Image (cartoon, rainbow, N blue to C red):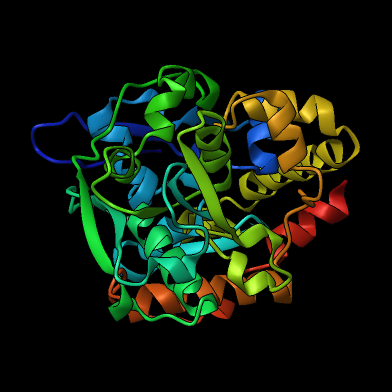
Amino acid sequence: MVEVLERKPAEKAVVVGAREAYYTICPVFSASNVAQELGWIEEEFNKIGAKLSYLRALSPEQGFLPHFGHQFDHLFRDGGNIPSIWAKADVTDTTLVALTAGHHGGQILVRADSDISSVADLKGRKFGLYKSLNDKKVDWWRATGERGILVALKLAGLKREDIEIVDAPDENRGFGNASKPSELWAKRRRDELIYTTEVKLLQDGKVDAVYTSHGRGQTLERTGAFKVIEDFSRNPDWTLQVANSPYALTVNTDFARNNRDIVVAFLRATVRAAHWVNANREAAATILHRVTYHEASADTAAAIAATDFLPSLSAQNLAGLDIQKKFLVDHGYVKRDFDSRKWADASYLDEALRSL
């Protein structure tokens, strides 16, 4: 049996075998990234006669948008939860099989030569906010930045009306293709990942502050041109650290139901990698550095020092997911709400854990 996934008429159809799965993983701290680099997912697939293919090995026209919308019927997606939530709400039926906690939350960045030393000083000032011009996908980076800005303002006793939002538009199209994630990310210069459009506005003095991720902020501070005035990772309130996290591992529902052993195989490899990472931080940092964007492996090691890589559908992880989902619904990033407890199915992960 072979399934043909129809794309736009101008594109060739992607032929997928019945025992073949595609995967895509964001450049985040997840055990699946390590499992893939070590060859463990493919190893587990080989044991059950299944085939593993990388989504971004396809052309950008075919492989880029499904990373966000989950439009392939045989797809595993691991990474930031905003696209996963959007895909479930507004695009296609998926099942949530695991979550991985991420506790950095992001930072508020200003120019180093600015007289601004706290978020309270930003009253009446301009915040740069990324804006994707690609309307075929959820604007996950804008959503992350908008929530970060609003959280920072609330902590400082300010409201949205107290600052001016300046959009930083970006075409946001797919780039290149590769045989695996580390090869894909090696094709992009790190400064392209760091100097996002809103950071360029800040660099040029057109805005007074931006939200950025921890890894980007660290690299930008080292240039001497920027300084961090708020770091959510230092706040004891874990709910403030929700930023496109916890990371979500999802799979198309029909495929999961019809190929339970393949889902369990993917999770077995991920759990094996999680245990290995938790016990071998420095070696794991070297691997994760290839698929993320901290400046050096030592920075990656420091960033993952307190991270538990073992995926879990724990009550806290699901609560974090709901915090992110509520923001997306309330601010119009997704149209339809849904019950995350019904989205999640722990039976696949439970089976993987029992089998190891």
Q: Residue at x 43, y 34 (%)?
A: 194
Q: Is residue 226 visible?
A: yes
Q: Residue at x 25, y 64 (%)?
A: 165
Percent position of residue 302, x then y: 76, 38
Which quadrant holds the N terminus?
Answer: top left
Percent position of residue 62, x then y: 27, 34
Percent position of residue 175, x then y: 30, 26
Q: Is residue 38 visible?
A: no
Name which quarter of the figure residue 82 lies in: bottom left
How many numbered marks are there?
0
Q: Is residue 16 above or below residue 69?
A: above
Q: Residue furthest front?
A: 115
Q: Is residue 152 above or below residue 54?
A: below
Q: Residue furthest right?
A: 279
Q: Residue furthest left?
A: 10
Name which quarter of the figure residue 105 lies in: bottom right
- Seen from the viewer's position, the closer of residues 33 and 324 is 324
Q: Residue at x 9, y 37 (%)?
A: 9
Q: Is residue 95 above or below residue 228?
A: below
- Seen from the viewer's position, the closer of residues 212 and 245 is 212
- Seen from the viewer's position, the closer of residues 149 and 226 is 226
Percent position of residue 42, x then y: 65, 27
